[in-house]
Amino acid sequence: LRAMKDFEFMTPLVEKADSKDTAVRQGSLLVFETISGSFATLLEPYLASVLPRLLSALSESSSEIRNYGWATAKVILSTLTAQGVRMNLPALLHGLEERTWRRKAGSAQILGAMAFCAPMQLAVLLPQFIPKLADG
């Protein structure tokens, strides 16, 4: 993990997640999935930069990118702690304000999955995100 920080491994990886090339985006999602599974909670501070790209992948018109996005989301959510939920909720709440229905739906589904990781944190924030879910 120290080497990842020293060599700024996440910066080019996050940039690749924004690529127009489908294969490059799939590769970056696969790397996110792999390092999330390997480093688990140690990667939580970096998720703030990954989550917007993940939400973007979930809202893609390409089913291949969406499938890679969901696979990555499942691995990330399986290792997320209550602190990680708290750190990454702002990005998800922002995703609920998006205009595209797929991005909004992806944010809502990830919030639902996070309810199993940190139910108390989400219960406190229900008044914030229920109106955003209700807006069409």
Image: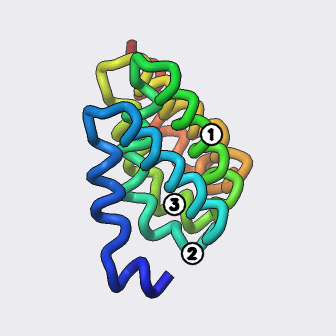
Residue 99: quadrant of the picture? top left
Name the side, left or right, on which 47 lies relative to 75: left
Q: Taking 72 as reference, is 133 above or below it?
A: above
Label 1 CA crowd tier, 10 Å (few <14, some 14–19, many 20+): some
Q: Residue 30: x, y in percent?
A: 53, 48
User: Which residue is pictured at 57% across the width and 52% down the height?
Assistant: 33
Work out whether 119 lies above or below 103. below
Looking at the image, is mark 3 or mark 2 nearer the viewer?
2
Query: Of the numbered discs in the image, which one, if any, rests on residue 86?
Result: 3
Element marked by disc 3:
helix
Name the element at disc 1. Answer: helix
Where is 39 relative to 104, above or below? below
Is 50 left, or right, of 11 in this rendering? right
Amino acid, disc 2: Leu
Give the structural element (helix, strand or loop) at label 2: helix
Question: Tag 1 or tag 3, which sits nearer the N-term?
Answer: 1
Q: Is residue 128 visible?
A: no
Q: Residue 71 carries which label?
A: 1
Tag in front: 1 or 2: 1
| Disc 3/disc 2 C-alpha distance (Å) | 15 Å
Residue visible at 39% across and 58% down in the picture: 48
- Which residue is label 2 attached to? 42
Other-residue count near label 2 (Cα within 10 Å), few / some / many at <14 / 14–19 / ≥20 = some
For residue 86, side relative to residue 8 (left or right): right
First in sequence, mark 1 or 2: give its number.
Answer: 2
Quadrant assignment for the C terminus: top left
